[in-house]
């Protein structure tokens, strides 16, 4: 870590995270270690927000969901909502892994937050995870009344592989004239398969996620190279990003995926889409889990939550105008 100038808090986060290792190299062992890591960094759940587990019966499979609800009376048109897609390289994670961000997000934005337990690789390769997320999007639109949400005021959000899925979902639904998210909020997303970008070289051995790790996860989820230019896997491969919803994209300075997020913002703005860029200086991939331990991560989370609230307010017509020009924060 010597050539990555990390704060003391971030160094401690790296050290603690490194104590959670699998007993062997198997997928099951890796998942068990990741689950233990997630439990360690997840605060004890309190009574706020309310939590409900549901199952969406989709063709050929069931998709578990977890719904976080703010306390209090819902607005007449239903709660604004966030469809949150968890990270984990499409290989690890689930309903419990990202409670640390989903629960506070429901309270801080006064939104219903829906987390998707999409199918994981390598048992289910591309486009299985994407298909599950798309099915849940259509479910939210069709069952908005029973869920108590406003179907016209949904932000799609996610971190890492979840940010990839969120951007791909926006590409699948927004330009087609049907119901679309009012915004996309992405945290250190992987958005392309061009691993020659400078950040992959500059941060090749970064703590918590190396460039080799990125290649490993991609091969598990999308083993067929012929799929690597599919926008459902690589949103940066789309010929145009015009018509997509406004975006907030946060990246970590010392992350192989950093340039994916920056390039996505540049592409969005070039195609006339309002996009806000947050550079988390001194941060690493996966740092969101240090929300309560690291001031730099807390700033990233606050920017993320504020962006979600602004998108929802704009979706209700309360806020006019465009996002600020692309800026560096953190």
Image (spheres, rainbow, N blue to C red):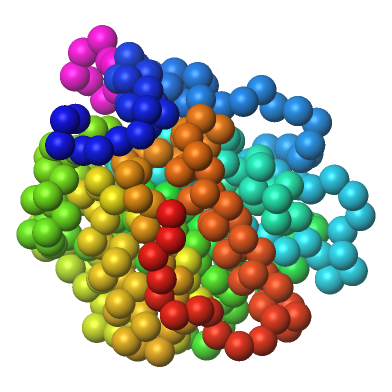
Quadrant occupied by the C terminus: bottom left
Magenta residues (range): 21-31
- What percent of the width, then of the height, locates residue 25? 19, 19
Horizontal side of residue 237 vs 329, given as left or right: left
- Residue shown at the point (60%, 43%) measured from the top left: 102
- What percent of the width, then of the height, locates residue 286? 37, 39
- What percent of the width, then of the height, locates residue 323? 53, 79
- Residue shown at the point (54%, 57%) measured from the top left: 303
Extreme-top residue of the structure: 23
Q: Nearer the viewer, residue 122 or 307?
A: 307
Quadrant occupied by the N terminus: top left
Q: Nearer the viewer, residue 34 or 5?
A: 5
How many callouts does the rendering have? 0
| Quarter of image, res 198 | bottom left
Horizontal side of residue 189 vs 51, given as left or right: left
| Quarter of image, res 67 | top right
Horizontal side of residue 119 vs 245, given as left or right: left
Q: Nearer the viewer, residue 156 or 48?
A: 48
| Quarter of image, res 231 | bottom left
- What percent of the width, then of the height, locates residue 309? 66, 64
Q: Is residue 22 magenta?
A: yes
- Residue shown at the point (8%, 59%) measured from the top left: 196
Q: Is residue 224 magenta?
A: no
């Amino acid at each position: 870590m010597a050539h990555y100038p990390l704060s003391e808090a971030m160094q401690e986060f790296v050290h603690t995270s490194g104590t959670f290792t699998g007993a062997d190299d198997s997928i099951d062992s890796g998942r068990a270690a990741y689950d233990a890591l997630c439990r360690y960094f997840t605060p004890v759940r309190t009574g706020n927000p309310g939590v409900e587990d549901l199952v969406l019966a989709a063709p050929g499979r069931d998709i578990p969901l977890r719904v976080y609800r703010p306390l209090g009376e819902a607005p007449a048109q239903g709660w604004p909502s966030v469809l949150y897609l968890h990270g984990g390289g499409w290989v690890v994670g689930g309903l419990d892994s990202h409670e640390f961000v989903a629960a506070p997000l429901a309270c801080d934005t006064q939104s219903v937050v829906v987390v998707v337990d999409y199918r994981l690789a390598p048992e289910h390769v591309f486009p299985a995870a994407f298909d599950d997320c798309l099915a849940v999007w259509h479910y939210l639109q069709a069952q908005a009344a029973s869920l108590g949400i406003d179907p016209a005021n949904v932000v799609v959000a996610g971190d890492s592989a979840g940010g990839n899925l969120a951007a791909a979902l926006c590409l699948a639904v927004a330009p087609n004239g049907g119901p679309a998210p009012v915004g996309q909020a992405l945290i250190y997303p992987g958005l392309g398969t061009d691993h020659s970008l400078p950040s992959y070289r500059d941060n090749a051995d970064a703590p918590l996620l190396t460039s080799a790790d990125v290649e490993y996860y991609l091969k598990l989820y999308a083993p067929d190279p012929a799929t690597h230019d599919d926008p459902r896997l690589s949103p940066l491969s789309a010929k145009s990003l015009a018509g997509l919803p406004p975006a907030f994209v946060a990246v970590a300075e010392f992350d192989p995926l950093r340039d994916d997020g920056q390039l996505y913002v540049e592409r969005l703005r070039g195609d006339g889409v309002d996009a806000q860029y947050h550079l988390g200086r001194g941060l690493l991939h996966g740092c969101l889990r240090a929300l309560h331990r690291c001031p730099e991560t807390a700033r990233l989370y606050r920017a993320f939550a504020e962006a979600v609230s602004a998108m929802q307010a704009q979706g209700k017509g309360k806020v006019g105008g465009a996002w600020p020009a692309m800026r560096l924060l953190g």
